């Protein structure tokens, strides 16, 4: 999608591809979160917004640790292409 605001461009691209995020609610929709260290300062606001609308979290190790520090429950998952003992690949 094309737009001067990256968020709008992403939304347009997802809509054009007929991709829609799972709707949070009783089915326990999870948001997969993997944030680079340089962007982790924005994680509290992002996590609060996602939790507020009902998403649960799945995250890679570093992001999962930070989400736990923020008081969120999180399912820890291995990075794409990596298998970690005890974690789903």
Image: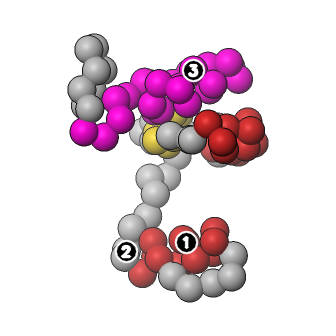
Residue 15 falls inside the magenta stretch: no
Q: Which mark is residue 11?
A: 1
The residue sitting at 43% across, 24% down in the picture is 76
Mark 2 or mark 3: whose residue is earlier in sequence: 2
Q: Is residue 12 visible?
A: yes
Give the quadrant of residue 68: top right
> Which disc is residue 65 wearing?
3
* Label 1 environment density (alpha carbons within 10 Å; few <14, some 14–19, many ≥20): some
Residue 30 lies left or right of residue 41; in this view the side is left
- Under circle 1, the secondary element is helix
Q: Give x and y (percent) for residue 30.
A: 46, 39
Is the residue marked by circle 3 packed among few (<14), some (14-19), or many (20+) residues within 10 Å?
Answer: some
Mark nearer the N terminus (1 vs 2): 1
In this view of the protein, which residue sits in the foreground, 83 or 21? 83
Q: Looking at the image, which residue is at 54% across and 71% down?
A: 10
> What is the total number of numbered labels drawn onto the structure image?
3
Q: Tag 2's secondary structure?
A: loop
- In the depicted structure, whether residue 57 falls above or below residue 10: above
Residue 79, given in percent of the width and then of the height, sits at 35, 35
Q: Nearer the viewer, mark 2 or mark 3?
A: 3
- The residue sitting at 31% across, 40% down in the picture is 80
> Is residue 66 on the magenta stretch?
yes
The residue at which mark 2 appears reads as 18
Q: Which residues are magenta?
A: 58-81
Judge depth for marks 3 and 1 and give the one in front. Answer: 3
Instruction: Give me the C-alpha separation between circle 1 and circle 2.
Output: 10 Å
């Amino acid at each position: 999608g094309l737009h001067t605001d990256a968020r709008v461009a992403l939304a347009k691209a997802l809509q054009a591809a007929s991709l829609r995020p799972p709707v949070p609610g009783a089915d326990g929709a999870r948001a997969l979160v993997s944030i680079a260290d340089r962007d982790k300062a924005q994680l509290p606001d992002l996590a609060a917004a996602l939790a507020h609308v009902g998403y649960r979290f799945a995250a890679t190790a570093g992001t999962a640790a930070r989400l736990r520090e923020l008081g969120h429950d999180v399912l820890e998952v291995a990075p794409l292409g990596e298998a970690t003992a005890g974690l789903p690949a």
